[in-house]
Image: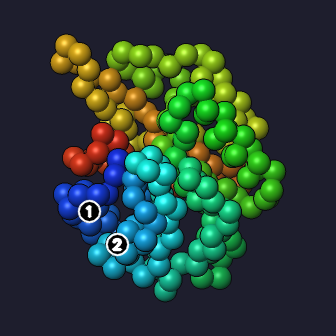
Amino acid sequence: MSCLSWNCCGIGNAATVKELHDLTRRVAPSVLCILETQVHKARVEQLKGTLGFDRAFAVSSTGRSGGLGIFWNSNNIQIDILPYSQYHIDAIVKEGDSEPWRRTCVYGEAQVQERHKTWSLLKFIKSSSHLPWACVGDFNEVLHQSEHVGVQEHRFSQMAGFREMVDVCGFCDLGFEGRNWTFEKRVTGGSFCRVRLDRGLATDDWCSRFPNASVRHLTAAASDHQPILLC
């Protein structure tokens, strides 16, 4: 199976929806997660047919901030939605007769001073389940300074909180294929700030179950974030 995750920075215009449609047709993911939808949940869930899925669940944005959606086809996969928030959707995934595992779609708190809430949330999820677990999305943070090229480098204290959460949850970074960054913006002077904000993390038991898992950085024009595909 494959899971596609994309911070689309809003799906309020036709161009973004078209690119999302073209993207899902091209890579045919088993599960699609979109982040920072910036619209009401009903508008997100209405896209399921357009995107080629028969099931959808979404969390409304708060004004123009946040919002998430997850899509899947019930004939291929069973997904049971667990507790969720404006910044995550937690779910149990089951394929056919195989054993279930946990998949969390994450949009990290955008405000630096509030980001500890995201790390606390993930540590709580870890404590509440012993299933193999994969966590994919936009964490809004880096693990290493080398993952940020350009101005406004991340402070060590910011990275330390992220690293501590990764250690407590027993995550390993699934790595990537493709460009070194997933977020890009042009800054003063015409140069670029390029950062690896989007990634896949998984526990050791999940990695043992899926030893050939890989993450690919794709490309998209409608957002300053690039989609990531976990296979």
Q: Mark 2 points at which residue?
A: 47
Helix, strand or loop status at disc 2 = loop
Q: Do the residues labelled 1 and 2 touch (CB within 8 Å)?
A: yes
- Closer to the chain start, of discs 1 and 2, is 1
Q: Which amino acid does label 2 sit on?
A: Leu
Image x and y of residue 163, in percent:
65, 29
Is 112 located above or below residue 178 in the figure?
above
> What residue is at 66 percent from the left and 33 percent from the top?
116
Q: What is the C-alpha distance between the residues marked 1 and 2?
A: 8 Å
Residue shown at the point (31%, 32%) measured from the top left: 184
Q: Is residue 143 left or right of residue 32?
A: right
Query: Residue 40 — which label?
Result: none
Answer whether residue 228 is visible to the viewer in this image. no
Q: Is residue 87 left or right of residue 47?
A: right
Q: Which of 97 and 55 is in front in this view?
A: 55
Q: Is residue 12 above or below residue 111?
A: below
Disc 2 crowd, CA 10 A, few/some/many (<14, 14-19, 20+): some
Residue closest to the far front: 63
Residue ID at (29%, 75%): 50
Residue 171 lies, in percent from the top left, at 67, 42
112 in relation to 211, above or below: above
User: Which residue is drawn at the image coordinates 37% and 38% (left, top)?
Assistant: 182
Seen in the picture, residue 50 relative to 90 is either above or below; the reply is below
Task: Name the residue that disc number 1 marks.
Answer: 17
Percent coordinates x, y for residue 133 in the rendering: 67, 56
- Tell me if 145 is positioned left or right of 98 in this view: left
Disc 1 element = helix
Occupied quadrant, residue 131: bottom right
Among the 4 quarters of the image, the one containing residue 195 = top left
Q: Which amino acid does label 1 sit on?
A: Val
